[in-house]
């Protein structure tokens, strides 16, 4: 007899009894989705993995700590059989057949009445991939197809031409520290949906090359303005394009709210009633040191880290930083935008008690192909920056964590 393909269907299990036999790795992988579907999950197993046991302890599932017994599948709508007892699996499968309960067998797909597809999710869409027959089932193949489809939906490369999703208003998107792969999934998707992208110099520039030809890309650094009108001009550009009914992405480096003036832009948009979505990004204050092999915290070395803007020198009356207090801290100090002020910063920290021999690392162009790390101390950092010609953008790390990581990261 010719083998027929499986019939795909989505089960609505909210409030319905689902029985899982076996508390091992298969159950650990499958239970979260069943719980998320709202099923009343009953586990039957003498043992369980710590993660499965935690689900029972928190009341997400009920657990009978014993082996399978005939009758366990009564009143069930769906069953997952995943025990290491072959005889119990066969008996439970037979009971499921008698009670007309759809049954998944982790040990024998041919004997099952249902198969679990490789699933993924993206913005309200569930992608489920099944092979056409049991003999041709290859979990790695179906998982690869699922991953490709989900990734396409997430990054916007897989969108029906006549069903392009558009997010109204403005999205303030944190692009991460520079490597285009470090933008969030949501940020990449919003970029793919944009009509206009207003980009910072420090944003992940490689992402702009992936945009469709119709997308207008505006370099924020080239918007006409006087020296002190930069932010106002950018705000006006965001408002102007959004009022034209366009989907606008303000692409920033790092995170919009970490020295990114994101709140200033959000406030300007709110004042004129334009919807604003904020998409957090990976901050360079943590990611760039990490990429250079420097942990900002480390057990027994640093229990705190402080992130400071160095664009204003310590002796500048505009500075809001309590430098004497920072000098007294024992943790890690991370300075952004401080390359040209590092000499005065180092002198100030030493003058207020920070040891002159405190290690310093400067990571230039972090996470990009041009990344390089330069090491110094507070006593030598100013001269080192000049001698090594360290240029912005660079993240400066001060503290004993500089010497913790292996140099192989360089």
Image (spheres, rainbow, N blue to C red):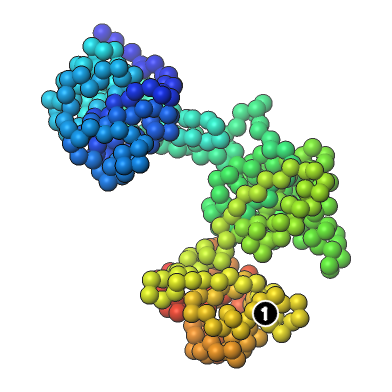
Picture mark count = 1
Q: Position of residue 91 (x, y in %)?
A: 16, 20
Please say if 248 is above or below 11.
below
On screen, residue 49 above or below 388: above
Of residue 96 and residue 209, the one placed in the foreground of this image is: 96
The residue that appears at 39% across and 33% down in the rendered structure is 35
Q: Position of residue 38 (x, y in %)?
A: 42, 29
Q: Quadrant of the N terminus?
A: top left
Residue 43: tell me if it is visible: yes
Q: Is residue 406 left or right of residue 352?
A: left
- Residue in the image at 85% along x and 59% along y: 224
Direction from residue 72 to residue 168 in the image, left or right? right
Residue at far left of view: 87
* Element on which disc 1 rests: helix
Q: Quadrant of residue 110?
A: top left
Rendering coords of residue 288 (x, y %)? 53, 66
Residue positioned 66% across, 33% down in the render: 165
* Residue in the picture at 79% in, 52% down: 268
Residue 136 seen by the camera: no
Q: Is residue 24 above or below residue 217?
A: above
Identify the residue under disc 1.
Answer: 340
Q: Mark 1 packing: few (<14 Cα in 10 Å), some, or many (20+)?
A: some
Foreground residue among 47 and 167: 47
Q: Nearer the viewer, residue 42 or 3?
A: 42
Q: x and y percent of residue 151 in the render?
A: 51, 39
Say whether residue 308 is left or right of residue 270. left
């Amino acid at each position: 007899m010719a083998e027929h393909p499986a019939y795909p269907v989505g089960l609505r299990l909210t409030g319905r009894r689902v029985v899982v036999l076996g508390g091992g790795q298969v159950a650990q992988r499958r239970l979260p989705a069943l719980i998320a579907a709202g099923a009343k999950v009953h586990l039957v197993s003498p043992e369980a993995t710590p993660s499965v046991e935690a689900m029972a302890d928190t009341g997400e599932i009920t657990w009978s700590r014993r082996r399978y017994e005939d009758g366990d599948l009564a009143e069930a709508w769906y069953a997952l059989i995943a025990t290491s007892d072959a005889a119990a699996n066969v008996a439970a499968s037979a009971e499921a057949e008698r009670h007309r309960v759809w049954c998944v067998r982790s040990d024998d797909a041919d004997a099952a009445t249902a198969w679990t597809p490789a699933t993924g999710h993206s913005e309200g869409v569930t992608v489920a991939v099944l092979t056409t027959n049991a003999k041709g089932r290859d979990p790695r193949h179906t998982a690869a197809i699922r991953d490709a489809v989900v990734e396409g939906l997430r990054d916007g490369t897989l969108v029906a031409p006549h069903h392009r999703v558009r997010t109204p208003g403005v999205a303030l998107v944190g692009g991460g520290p520079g490597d285009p792969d470090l933008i969030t999934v949501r940020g990449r998707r919003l970029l793919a949906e944009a009509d206009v992208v207003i980009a910072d110099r420090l944003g992940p520039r490689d992402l702009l090359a992936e945009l469709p030809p119709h997308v207008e890309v505006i370099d924020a650094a080239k918007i006409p303005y006087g020296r002190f009108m930069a932010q106002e001009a950018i705000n006006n550009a965001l408002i102007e394009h959004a009022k034209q009914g366009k989907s606008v992405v303000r692409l920033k480096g790092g995170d919009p709210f970490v020295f990114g003036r994101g709140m200033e832009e959000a406030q300007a948009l709110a004042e004129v009633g334009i919807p604003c979505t904020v998409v957090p990004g990976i901050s360079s204050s943590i990611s760039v040191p990490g990429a250079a092999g420097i942990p900002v915290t480390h057990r027994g070395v640093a229990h705190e880290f402080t992130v400071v803007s160095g664009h204003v020198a310590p002796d500048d009356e505009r500075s809001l930083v309590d430098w004497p207090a920072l000098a007294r801290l024992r943790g890690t100090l991370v300075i952004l935008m401080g390359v040209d002020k590092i000499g005065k910063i180092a002198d100030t920290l030493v003058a207020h008690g920070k040891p002159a021999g405190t290690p310093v690392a400067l990571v230039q162009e972090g996470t990009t192909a041009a990344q390089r790390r330069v090491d110094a101390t507070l006593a030598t950092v100013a001269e080192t920056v000049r001698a090594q010609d360290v240029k912005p953008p660079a993240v400066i790390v001060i503290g004993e964590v500089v010497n913790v990581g292996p140099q192989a990261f360089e």
